[in-house]
Amino acid sequence: MSKHTFSIGGVHPHDNKISRECPITPLPIAPTVYISVAQHIGAPSVPCVAVGDKVKVGQVIAEPGGFVGAFIHSSVSGTVKSIAPRADLAGRATTHIEIAVEGDEWADGIDTTDTLVTTIPEDPKAIVEKIKLGGVVGLGGATFPTHVKLSPPPGSKCERVIINGCECEPYLTSDFRTLLEKGEQVVVGAALLKKAMGDVPCTIAIEENKPEAIAHIQDVIAKLGYQGIEVMVMKMMYPQGGEKQLIDAVMHRQVGSGALPISVGAVVQNVATALAVYDAVQKNKPIVDNSVTVTGECFPKQANLLVRVGTPLRYILDYLGGVPEEAAKIISGGPMMGRAVANLDAATVKGTGALLLLTEKQTKRAPATQCIRCGKCADACPMGLEPFLLNKLSKAADWDACEANAAQDCIECGCCLYSCPAHIPLLDNIRVGKGFVLSAIRARAKK
Ligand code: SF4
Ligand code: SF4
């Protein structure tokens, strides 16, 4: 079977999927949840409940705050206790809706049965509307509102839907488990996305290190009999699941600097998003929970948990026996692209896919030495950038030169940092430059 990959850069970190045998199991509901109104790219949502209100699971508690926005639903039944700023995963004060849990009563009209619904609605617009009402956002990390992504601007046309089942980040296994355990729903979700985009072909891309998932999804496609959906086996290569890299690998098309995937006819959604699309359209079930991998060599219990949105991280870790003494750092996400957790009282959001616990030894960086101009960082960069140069320009605060050298195209994959024999904190510095360049670009666009 031929295997596919992107054409430039990439690295081969050890995949460390030590939680791959852990089935997704529901975490008992926490006594109190804290639901952020800023869980997606775009304007924060606007609360539509008040302190003292009784809410049910799946009830809308915040409405979109702009065109690029999303509905937010209660993940529990209970009473709204407060609507106030609270530190999020990064430590930023963000408005959260605090709900004290009472029972587990679901809002009317949500189908909570396991019955598989395979009939695809005829009207693409009705599919997109249900995705919007379900508060679906990209769950592969970007959290971009899915209904917006499925509404191409005038003049753009989708030619292929790609479902990202690569899960190329080391340690993460929740997408793999979702493919194995919810493969039917993922394939129906893919068929819905395909229909929403005008019955275009659909590719489900899965990395070669998940042979059980590849075989299972191929069986499901054959069993359900949908036409125009295929599985593509991808080489193990990081960052295979990067949107632009996946489009290159599947369609052999390059998304230009600053352009969207739709500019080359592609719409990419990940496996968890396809499942959320199935839930929203076929079961009227909005996003109220998500699968979270909890893992790390220092952690005695590996797990994949189904977690209600807004669950405090401390509650999750306590359920699994608490944070071991050896754990020096907790990352939300994987080791390459994840972000350090600033506070354990922060609550999960729709996009929380993993908690990774690392020891001091695993996180300690060797002291940086002089650049030896080996070019390894440039060879590894999947965006064709020159990380050594961007690092230098960023440190010199030369933002114009950073922009001229496309710092804004950096996808923050960390391949440069991973490859550098001089241990220069390339990504940390480039991220600063990218931030300034993006602010300047946004300011110019407003004028
Ligand atoms: S972090 Fe940015 S500069 Fe470094 S390899 Fe990835 S895309 Fe290139
Ligand atoms: S990999 Fe490190 S040492 Fe080599 S050119 Fe890049 S920054 Fe310099």
Image (spheres, rainbow, N blue to C red):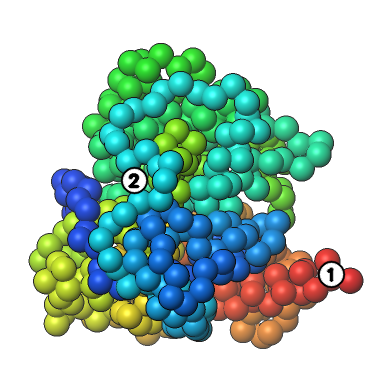
- As helix, strand or loop, the secondary structure at mark 2 comes to helix
Residue 321, image x, y percentages: 11, 71
Looking at the rendered image, the quarter that the N terminus falls into is top left
C-alpha separation, residue under disc 2 versus residue under disc 1:
38 Å
Question: Residue shown at 60%/38% (left/top)?
Answer: 128
- In this view, the residue in front, 210 or 315, is 315
Question: Residue shown at 64%/74% (left/top)?
Answer: 435
Residue 309, image x, y percentages: 37, 62
Q: Is mark 1 within 8 Å of ligand 1?
A: no
Residue 46, image x, y percentages: 60, 68
Q: Do the residues labelled 2 and 1 touch (CB within 8 Å)?
A: no
- In this view, the residue in front, 176 or 86, is 86
Question: Residue shown at 39%/34% (left/top)?
Answer: 186
**Residue 30 left/right relative to 430:** left
Outermost residue, right side = 447
Three-letter code, disc 2: Asp
Residue at image mark 2: 175
Looking at the rendered image, the quarter that the C terminus falls into is bottom right
Residue 356 visible somewhere in the drawing = no
Residue at image mark 1: 446
Three-letter code, disc 1: Lys
